[in-house]
Amino acid sequence: MKKVFVTGKRGSLSVAVAEYLKNNSKNSVEQISLRGDAWKSENFSSFDAVVHIAGVTPQNAKATEDYDKINTELTRELAEKCRHDGVSQFIYISSMAVYGIAQSMDIKKGTVTAETIPAPDSDYGKSKLQAEKALKALESDDFRIAVIRVPSIYGKGKTEYIDQYQYLAEKLPVIPRAFENYYKSAICVQNLCELIRLTIQEHYAGMICPDDGQISAVDFCSAIYPDKKKSRFLGKLIELFLKNNSRILDYYGAVCYAKELTNVFEGRYRITDFKKAVKQAYEG
């Protein structure tokens, strides 16, 4: 049995990961808040691993400087303390945003491969990449670092990402079968939790780029409205005449990891089918 702590007490992902680890492993799991300075006086020597989730996102950042202060510097301080106290594994929840890849109607441009060099174009992405670099400098045989570059997240009670597909499918009489090989990397909460469990179990170190498989906008729309008919004819019209439309880019543009990047743990972290995860997302 390992002793693990998850950073963040109120964030939905922190709560979900902590609960999952408690219910699906033999590990002892605690949640620790990084608000204020109280955590700095804690002794982490009894812990085997930390899952660092707490941070700011574009949705909750109050000021630009929060990205550097919280995502980068706080991560560095926490890692330095964990290493000093003898914690042997540090799992950092980073983001696909470090690549600066935007949705694209050019599949190659919208796909992250092993050769893709991180080039973040947002303050959020930059802060995450700087945190990764700080962790890399602290890594050793006794302090193993696992970085998970998480794509968009969806799942039970978390619909922000897939709401756009609900809107698209709801407004049209049929689902247009357009750009079906333009994939969207996303991961449901359950699969991310299982990935973290496996990372702890295997004492894994390295870069992880996960997703739920090759899923297109059509797949998401169909999962939300499984009984709605699909039209290849309408899809073809969109492909021929609206490919350069900004709204079409938002809905259908590719932004994904290459398939070979996502096969960590032979894909065993994908325990929940995306259709089931989409359904659960709207069940609350």
Image (cartoon, grey):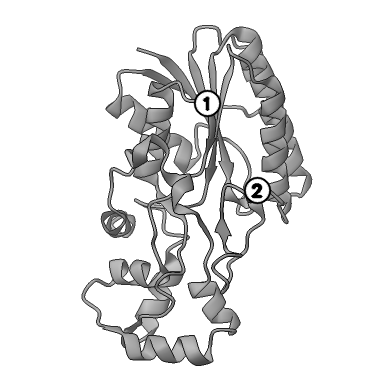
Residue at image coords 72%, 29%: 134
The vertical placement of 110 against 26, above or below, is below
Q: Which residue is mark 2?
A: 98
Q: Circle 1 sits in a helix, a strand or a loop, which is it? A: loop
Q: Is residue 127 left or right of residue 252?
A: right
**Relative to the observer, which residue lies in front, 152 or 18?**
152
Left or right: 127 as drawn, with respect to 156: right
Residue drawn at (68%, 48%) of the image? 118
Badge 1 is on which residue? 205
Which residue appears at 55% of the width and 7% of the height? Answer: 45
Q: Nearer the viewer, residue 82 or 284?
A: 82
The foreground one among 74 and 229 is: 229
Residue 111 location (% of width, % of height): 55, 59
**Circle 2 or circle 1, nearest the eye:** 1
Q: Where 140 sits versus 220, above or below?
A: above
- Mark 2 secondary-structure assignment: helix
Residue 50 appears at what percent x and percent y?
52, 22
Q: Position of residue 18 (x, y in %)?
A: 40, 30
N-terminal of the pair, mark 2 or mark 1, is 2
Say above or below: 230 vs 77. Answer: below
* Disc on res. 188: none
Is 121 positioned to the left or the right of 102 in the image?
right
Say which quadrant the N terminus sits in. top left
Residue 74 shows up from this direction: yes
| Amino acid type, mark 1 | Ala
x then y, percent, for residue 278: 32, 59
- Crowd tier of the residue under label 2, counting other residues whose Cα lies within 10 Å: few below 14, some 14–19, many 20 or above: many
> Between marks 2 and 1, how big is the CA–CA gap?
19 Å
| Left-right relation of 184 to 66 | left
Label 1: how many Cα within 10 Å (few below 14, some 14–19, many 20+): some
Residue 18 appears in the rendering: no
Residue at horizontal 37 percent and vertical 52 percent from the top = 155
